[in-house]
Image: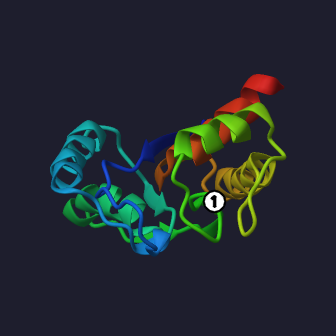
Amino acid sequence: MTIIFFIRHAEPERISGSVYNDRTYPLSQKGLNDRKLVTKFLLDKNIDAVLSSPFKRAVDTVADFADKNGFKIDLIEDFRERAIADAWIDDFKAFAEKQWADFSYKLDGGECLSEVQERNIRALKEVLAQYKGKKIVVGTHGTAVSTIIKHYDYY
């Protein structure tokens, strides 16, 4: 049996009203401290591999465990965070509610949740084939994990 521990990234820094690079969005000090809880949780799980979204906050969340246990973190592009828009969104809550109500809803430059789900399921199937019978860690994002759960909850 293959076992996957999906780890949603720890708390990121708060950035508001400015343009930022989502790929390099860092963890807050609390997030850096909390990743030690991830390490503690995973210590007795006999992990075989550590994978992650390429986004810094996801990598950094699993890096403490990987570094302390001699794992190289393999980056999986399709486990990345969703692309939201070409511009800053002031009312993110309203945007998110629209996306979850309509999986085809997206803004210019962004992805709809059906696109996010499709690439995450594709990545998951590739990981399951490559790591058959292994225990793996996947550093990822809340939206990614939620779309995966929704896929399997639907079927």
What amino acid type is highlighted by mark number 1? Ile
> Which picture quadrant has residue 60?
bottom left
Which part of the image, by quadrant, shows the C terminus?
Answer: top right
Quarter of the image for residue 147 reads top right
Scheme of colours in the image: rainbow
Q: Check disc 1 and report the residue beneath it.
A: 84
The residue nearer to you, when weighing 47 against 93, is 93
Front position in the image: 88 or 100: 88
Q: Nearer the viewer, residue 136 or 119?
A: 119
Q: Residue visible at 30% across and 48% down? A: 11
Q: Residue 57 at what x, y percent from top left?
A: 37, 61
Asked which secondary structure carries label 1, the reply is loop
Residue at 65% x, 64% y is 85
Residue placed most toward the observer, 87 or 115: 87
19 relative position to 95: left or right: left
Would residue 61 be found to the left or right of residue 150 on screen?
left
Which quarter of the figure is the N terminus placed in?
top right
Q: Does residue 36 sit above or below 88 in this rendering?
A: above
Image quadrant assignment for residue 108: bottom right
Judge whether residue 2 can be spotted in this image: no
The reply to whether residue 32 is visible in this rendering is yes
104 w.r.t. 76: above or below: above
Residue at the spot x=51%, y=53% of the render? 90
Left or right of 120, for residue 13? left
| Image x and y of residue 121, in percent | 74, 49
Rendered residue at 46%/73% (across/down)? 19
Residue 52 at x, y = what percent?
A: 48, 61
